[in-house]
Image (cartoon, grey):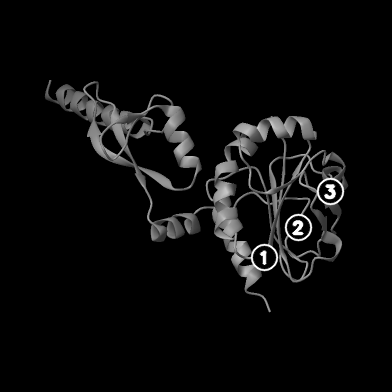
Amino acid sequence: MLKKTLFFLLFTVLLGNVKAQTKPANKLDEQSVVRAEDGNVYPYAVWRKLLSTGKYAIKNRKTFTDSGKPEYLLYELSDEQKEAYFDKMPKPRKSDNFAEGEEFKGFKATDMNGNKFDLRNAKDKVIVLNFWFINCPPCRSEIPQLNELVEQYKDNKDVIFLAIATDDRYDLKNFIKTNPFQYNIVDSGRSIAEKYNLRLYPTHVVIDKNGIIKFGTVGLASNTMHWLKRSIDESLALN
């Protein structure tokens, strides 16, 4: 009888260990309870959008709801925290069409305001390109962050921001009425995109003052803006 009792106890402990090991880890999803620093709960769409700006992070509050769900805290990062946070993250996905370290093969274009750009001979300038189109969700969502980036260099004439849109001028004008975009926008730029065999949007490229591709990425990651700014600053520092 004693042996059976000991066996049962041992089996119960082992079974508990197995359950503990196989219990799924908490993961952030639409059911997660995410609170702001003032204690208010944020809807999934809101906290996901805030996270995508790269200005916020989430950590476990180590508290639980009445139903036992773990609660998380969404908090704003300081400048130092952002640098440390982004440096730990994987670098944004590289562009196969704009390989870093290669010479940039430029093009001529005219933006929607009639400004002419000849990027075939734009040495001593840092060129920041954005290939996009209106119906691309990440292209639209990153525009406010791109506008902030332009604002940081508004007094520096050595930095050129150029957005190559595949949409026509009429559609772009209507879009910009409610979605201001501070880049110099080139409309109907599909032929330019095809020149570089682009298939993925958005695509960002930074070309340094020597005409060399400093940074090329596709898609939108939370540290895309961090790498764009770092690449611009490092390009400006070149002799």
From this view, report whether residue 18 is shown above or below residue 128. Answer: above
Q: Which residue is mark 1?
A: 157
Q: In the depicted view, which residue is nearer to us: 215 or 5?
A: 215
Estimate the spatial distance between the alpha carbons at disc 2 and disc 1, rounded to whole Å: 26 Å
User: Which tag, 2 or 1, sits closer to the chain's start?
Assistant: 2
User: In the visual, does 58 lie left or right of 187?
Assistant: left
Q: Residue furthest bottom?
A: 239
Decide: is 39 above or below 121: above
What residue is disc 2 on? Answer: 99
Q: Quadrant of the C terminus?
A: bottom right
The answer to whether mark 2 and mark 1 are in CB contact below 8 A is no
Total labels drawn: 3
Of all residues shown, which one is farthest toward the front? 113
Is label 2 or label 3 in front? 3
Q: Residue at x 74, y 71 (%)?
A: 124
* C-alpha gap between disc 3 and disc 1: 26 Å
- Residue 183 percent location from the top left of the image: 67, 49
Classify 10 Å Cα crowding around label 1: few (below 14), some (14-19), many (20 and above). Answer: few
- Secondary element at tag 1: loop
Q: Residue at x 73, y 34 (%)?
A: 172
Residue that appears at 29% across and 33% down? 71
Give the spatial CA distance, label 2 vs label 3: 11 Å
Secondary-structure class at tag 3: loop
The residue under label 2 is which amino acid type? Ala
Pinpoint residue 40: horizontal percent, then vertical percent. 29, 31
Q: Which mark is residue 196?
A: 3
Residue 33 placement (x, y as % from top left): 33, 29
**Mark 2 residue crowding within 10 angstroms, few (<14) / some (14–19) / many (20+):** some
Towards the viewer: 219 or 6: 219
Tell me the amino acid under the disc marked 1.
Answer: Lys
Rendered position, 117 above or below 210? above
